[in-house]
Image (cartoon, rainbow, N blue to C red):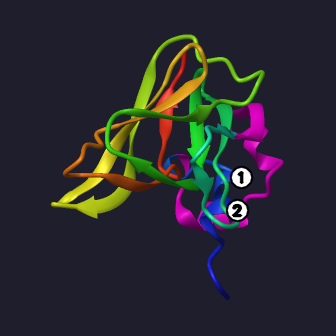
Amino acid sequence: MNPPSRRTLLTTLPVALVSSSTVLAAPASAAASEGVEIVAGWKPIVLRTGVTPFPGDAPQARAVRIAGTTFLQLRGGANVSFTADAVLGTLPSGLAVPKLTRGLCPRNNVNGLLACRVEADPKGQLTVLGGNTVTKITWVALDGFSSVLA
């Protein structure tokens, strides 16, 4: 039997909360009984002009509440061409970010740099930081982004 995909795991319970054997057995409805509440389900991120989603893995965002703490989670990825800090896109309508929140995300390897910072601001903008003419960012994977909102 093949293990579940990361996408399947992201739609059930956060991995950090349970052992892998529990995640494999936990149905999506088990989330509420384990102290996890879906505040806002997965919705597409609106990408800015010139940014293209990974084929079959377009960027999405959601909010979950775990033990009273709300998290912004992102998934998917995008092909970009950033030689400076730049806006990737905007969060879906209805997904509010009360304060600046940030996380690290994988990017193309240039001169040993494997990650970039991604920030979500109260206006809903997602900004990728760290690109420059020497270390151009050509893609960003958002699957590991999970940041505290409140």
Q: Quadrant of the rendered structure where residue 24 is? A: bottom right
- Give, as a single range, the part of the protein colored magenta: 17-44
Residue 59 included in the magenta stretch of the image? no
Residue 8: mark in rendering: 2
| Residue 147 spot, x, y in % from top left | 48, 31
Name of the residue lying farthest toward the left: 111
Image side of residue 67 versus residue 135, left or right: right
| Residue 106 spot, x, y in % from top left | 38, 54
In whole angstroms, how far apart are the C-alphas of marks 1 and 2? 7 Å
Visible in this render: residue 35? Answer: no
Q: Residue at x 62, y 41 (%)?
A: 49
Q: Check disc 2 and report its element: helix, strand or loop.
A: helix
- Specify the amino acid type for callout 1: Thr
Q: Which residue lies under the disc numbered 1?
A: 12
Q: Which residue is drawn at 73% across and 32% down?
A: 37
Name of the residue lying farthest toward the bottom: 1
